[in-house]
C-alpha cells in the first residue's frame, strides 16, 4: 500500500506558506483588523457628531446674545441699532421705527418662533386686523391687560442688561429679586404683600416685555413700539427686572394695584389710578417719581402727585386709550381696525362704530413679546415681610 493516504486524514492537512502561516490564520487576522476598523470608524463618527452638535448650540446662543451690529441680535439691555433712545426710556415708540422690533427681541412679523419668544404673525400694513385681533372688525377683548411704561433706569448695568448676574440660575435670580424688593417694601407694605398672596396673585419676571401696537401713520397702518416695565392680566403679573430695587418694588406695587381693580373700569381709568397711587407710594418711601412731570408742590411747598400730569402722560403714551368723541362727549377708545382699514372706536357706553383712520390712531396689540419666553416665577410665599 505504498503511496495510499486516507481521505479522512487529508481533511486536516492545511497548506502553509514559506513563512509558516496558514490560510486560516490569515482569515482570522483579516477579520480582527476589519472589526477594529469598523469600531474605530463608529467612534470617530460619534465624536464628530457630538462636536457638530456642540457647535450648533454655540451658534444658537450667539444668535440670542449677539453684538447687535448690522441688525444682529442684541443683548436685552443694549441700545437697539438705529439711534433710538435707550431701552426703557419711557414712551412707546421710542425705540425702533414702526414695524421694527429691537434686534434680539424675538422674531419679526411672520417669522414664527425663535429663542426669544414668538411674535404673532401679521400681514402687511393695511391688510385688516393686526396681530391676534381676530376677524376684521372684531376689535379687542374687553379685558385689555394693563401695562406700565419701562422706567429710565431699566437700562442701567444690571442682571437684565447683561451685568455680573446675567448668567445666574433661575433660583438665584428669583432670590435676589425677592430680597431687593423686600428691602424697599418692608415693613411698610407688609399688609399689601400679604394681600397679594392671599388673592392668589402671581409674579413672573423677564428681561424684556414689549408690544408692537398697530398704529396709523397718516398713510397706512403699521406698528409702534411700546417698551413695557410690566403688565397685568387678571391676577397674573408679568414684569421686567428693572435697573434698581426701587424700580422693581414700584412695579410690584403698580401692577399689584391693577390686580385689585374692578373689570368694569375703563383702561384709561385703571392706568390713571395705578400711576397716581404708585406716585403716592413713591412719596411715602422717599423715592423719585416714575416721570418727573408727576410731582408738584402744594401751597405749603410739599411735594404731591400732579393728577392732571399723570392723566396727560397716560393719554399720550398708551395706544388709543383716550380718543375725542366727535360730539365732544365722554372720551372714547380705539379698539381695532376693520377689513377696509377704518378705525374701530368704542364709545363710553360700550357700543362701537367705524370712521376713517386719523394720523396717530393706535390700539393695543393682543399680546406682548417676552424675553425669555417663559420668564422666572417668583415664590409669593417668599415675597413677604419677615
Image: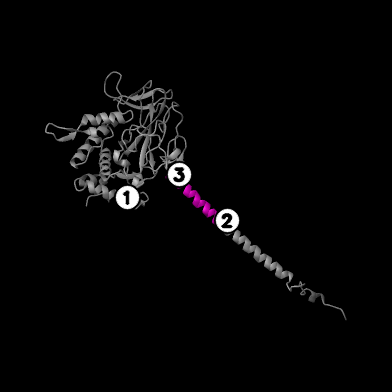
Q: Is residue 114 magenta?
A: no
Name, please, the residue furthest toward the bottom.
1
The residue where tag 2 is placed is 45
Q: Residue furthest left?
A: 300
Image-quadrant location for residue 267: top left
Label 3 SS: helix
Vertical arrangement, residue 333 with respect to residue 373, above or below: above
Q: Which residues are magenta?
A: 46-65
Q: Which mark is residue 337?
A: none
Q: Nearer the viewer, mark 1 or mark 2?
A: 2
128 or 216, which lies in front? 216
SS of the residue at dot 2? helix
Provide the secondary structure element on which disc 1 rests: helix
Dividing the picture into quarters, in which one does residue 88 lie?
A: top left
Between the C-alphas of marks 1 and 2, the distance is 42 Å
User: Residue beneath label 3, please?
Assistant: 63
Q: Nearest the camera: 87 or 246?
A: 87
Distance from label 3 to label 2 (Cα)? 27 Å
- Measuring from the top left, give residue 203's x and y in whole percent: 31, 45
Any mark on residue 174, and which? Answer: 1
Foreground: disc 3 or disc 2: 3
Distance in Å between CA atoms under marks 1 and 3: 25 Å
- Which of disc 2 and disc 1 is earlier in sequence? 2
Image location (x, y in percent) of residue 104: 42, 40
Q: Residues within 10 Å of mark 2 (few under 14, many from 20)?
A: few
In the image, taking residue 318 as reference, residue 341 lies left or right, namely right
The residue at 54%/57% (across/down) is: 47
| Residue 298: percent from left, percent from top | 14, 32
Residue 114 can be seen, yes or no:
yes
Q: Which quadrant, please, contains the N terminus? A: bottom right
Where 278 falls versus 316 (above or below)? below
Asked if marks 1 and 3 touch (Cβ < 8 Å), the reply is: no
Amino acid at each position: 500500500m505504498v503511496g495510499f493516504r486516507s481521505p479522512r486524514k487529508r481533511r486536516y492537512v492545511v497548506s502553509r506558506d514559506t513563512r509558516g502561516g496558514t490560510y486560516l490564520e490569515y482569515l482570522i487576522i483579516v477579520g480582527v483588523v476589519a472589526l477594529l476598523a469598523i469600531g474605530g470608524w463608529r467612534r470617530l463618527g460619534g465624536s464628530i457628531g457630538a462636536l457638530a452638535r456642540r457647535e450648533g448650540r454655540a451658534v444658537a446662543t450667539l444668535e440670542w446674545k449677539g453684538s447687535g451690529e448690522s441688525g444682529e441680535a442684541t443683548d436685552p439691555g443694549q441700545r437697539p441699532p438705529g439711534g433710538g433712545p435707550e431701552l426703557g426710556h419711557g414712551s412707546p415708540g421710542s425705540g425702533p421705527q414702526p414695524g421694527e422690533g429691537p434686534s434680539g427681541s424675538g422674531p419679526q412679523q411672520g417669522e414664527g418662533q425663535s429663542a426669544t419668544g414668538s411674535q404673532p404673525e401679521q400681514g402687511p400694513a393695511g391688510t385688516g386686523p393686526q396681530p391676534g385681533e381676530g376677524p376684521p372688525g372684531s376689535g379687542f377683548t374687553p379685558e385689555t391687560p394693563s401695562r406700565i411704561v419701562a422706567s429710565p433706569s431699566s437700562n442701567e448695568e444690571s442682571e437684565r442688561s447683561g451685568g455680573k448676574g446675567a448668567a445666574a440660575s433661575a433660583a438665584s435670580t428669583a432670590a435676589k429679586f425677592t430680597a431687593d424688593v423686600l428691602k424697599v417694601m418692608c415693613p411698610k407694605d407688609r399688609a399689601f404683600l400679604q394681600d397679594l398672596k392671599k388673592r392668589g396673585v402671581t409674579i413672573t419676571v423677564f428681561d424684556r416685555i414689549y408690544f408692537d401696537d398697530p398704529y396709523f401713520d397718516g398713510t397706512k397702518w403699521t406698528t409702534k413700539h411700546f417698551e413695557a416695565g410690566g403688565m397685568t392680566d387678571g391676577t397674573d403679573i408679568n414684569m421686567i427686572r428693572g435697573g434698581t430695587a426701587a424700580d422693581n418694588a414700584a412695579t410690584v406695587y403698580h401692577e399689584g394695584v391693577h390686580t385689585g381693580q374692578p373689570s368694569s373700569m375703563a383702561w384709561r381709568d385703571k392706568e390713571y389710578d395705578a400711576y397716581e397711587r404708585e406716585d403716592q407710594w413713591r412719596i411715602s418711601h422717599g423715592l423719585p417719581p416714575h416721570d418727573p412731570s408727576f410731582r408738584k408742590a402744594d401751597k405749603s411747598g410739599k411735594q404731591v402727585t400732579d393728577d392732571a400730569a399723570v392723566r396727560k402722560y397716560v393719554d399720550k403714551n398708551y395706544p388709543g386709550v383716550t380718543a375725542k368723541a366727535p360730539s365732544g362727549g365722554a372720551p372714547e377708545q380705539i379698539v381695532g381696525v376693520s377689513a377696509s382699514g377704518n378705525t374701530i372706536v368704542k364709545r363710553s357706553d360700550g357700543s362701537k362704530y367705524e370712521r376713517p383712520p386719523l394720523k396717530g390712531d393706535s390700539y393695543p396689540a393682543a399680546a406682548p413679546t417676552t424675553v425669555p419666553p417663559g420668564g422666572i416665577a417668583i415664590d409669593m410665599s417668599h415675597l413677604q415681610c419677615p
